[in-house]
Image: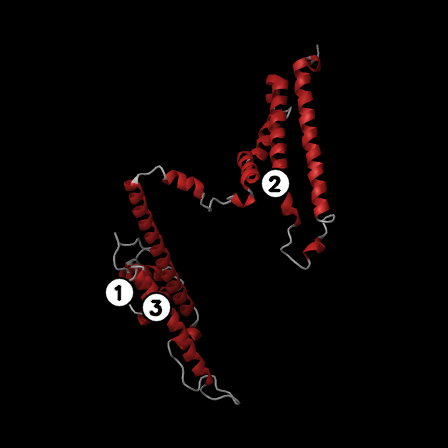
Amino acid sequence: MRVADYPTIQDYVGEAIIDTNVVRSMDFMIAKALDDATNGCDWSLHKDDLNVLPRSALLHWLWQLKFAAAKNVAHVSDKMLHACGGTGYKPGLGIERYLRDGKAGWVMGPTNEVLRQFIGKASLLGFATLDYWNQAVNERVLNNEIKKLDSAGKQALAEKLLKEAAASKAADVWAGFVQYFEQSTLELANDRGMRELITGGYTESLGWARGTPPTRLAELLEQNHKTMGVHMIKLVRRAKRAGVLRRDFQASDMMVLSLGVQATIAFGGAESPGLYRRALGFILDGLRPARDKPTQLPSPALTDEELLSMRRR
């Protein structure tokens, strides 16, 4: 008998054809629906409103198609390997390659397991309940778990959450302060003209030209200083309220410390461009009211040879 004469093989092939044609029909149906929704893929739909999303209403159908197609490919290739027996593992036949590649559609995101859950949840609870990036809180599940706690357990949980919230807020405030301090320092260090203007290295007749008062540009710079001063005061106060900045630090200290770091940038030059980060690390650690241990510095100290070389430049 030929292999094709065995009823089991006929069953394998018949099931594969039936399942594949079902998925193929579904594919054609959804493709037609996509064309109808976009008037034959007419891009002029977006001419007046770029937020028009005509295909979005068919998203759940596309999910179902991806699930069915990936599942069918994996199933059919697996059945064909069974049909071929041990011969199916020969590289020349190609079945083992189809089996391996057929799994790719299943595991590529969103995986078939995730799609099943998405489709079921959207059907039962609505699309608004889907949490694609695991960022929304499922309050029903949360409240159900909290109900299991006694009074002491709820109290302990509340205290833990409050501590975590306070720590998270403090970390965000400190990160914002550090980012502003470092970024503004780098910008001033790399722009000599701006540095001299910010530090007051100009006269009242700066930028004077006919038709304008001789003090006009100087007045604008003074206004800019006042505006930036207000923002720095708010930044400092916010950090103090969060308990991440020592109480005796003032907004005016920021410029003084920034000048020190800028001098380190100039001293390091091209030979040691990261040297300033070491000085910055010392300064920032000194600004914190408390810490468990000294912060690890991002740059090593200069060797005696490096320091001597830089001094001789």
Q: Which one is in front, 181 or 59?
A: 59
Alpha-carbon distance for marks 3 and 2? 55 Å
Alpha-carbon distance for marks 2 and 1? 56 Å
Can residue 298 be seen here? The reply is no
What residue does disc 1 label?
Answer: 247
Farthest right residue in view: 40
What residue does disc 3 label?
Answer: 258
Comes first in the chain, label 3 or label 1:
1
Q: Residue at x 63, y 25 (%)?
A: 76
- Is 299 on the left or on the right of 137, as rendered? left
- Is 63 on the left or on the right of 136, as rendered? right
The crowd level at tag 3 (other Cα within 10 Å; few <14, some 14-19, many 20+) is many
> Where the N terminus falls, by quadrant?
top right
Residue 240 image offset from top left, x and y in percent: 30, 63
Of helix, strand and loop, which one carries label 1? loop
What residue does disc 2 label?
Answer: 60
Can residue 117 be seen here? The reply is yes
- Is 160 on the left or on the right of 6, as rendered? left
Comes first in the chain, label 2 or label 1:
2
| Type of amino acid under label 1 | Arg
Q: Which one is in front, 308 or 121?
A: 121
> Where the C terminus falls, by quadrant?
bottom left
Farthest top residue in view: 1
Q: Are marks 3 and 2 in contact (CB under 8 Å)?
A: no
Q: Which one is in front, 131 or 40?
A: 131
The crowd level at tag 2 (other Cα within 10 Å; few <14, some 14-19, many 20+) is some
Of circles 3 and 2, the one toward us is: 2
Which numbered tag is attached to residue 216? none
Q: Residue at x 46, y 85 (%)?
A: 216
| Type of amino acid under label 2 | His
Colouring style? secondary structure
| Type of amino acid under label 3 | Ser
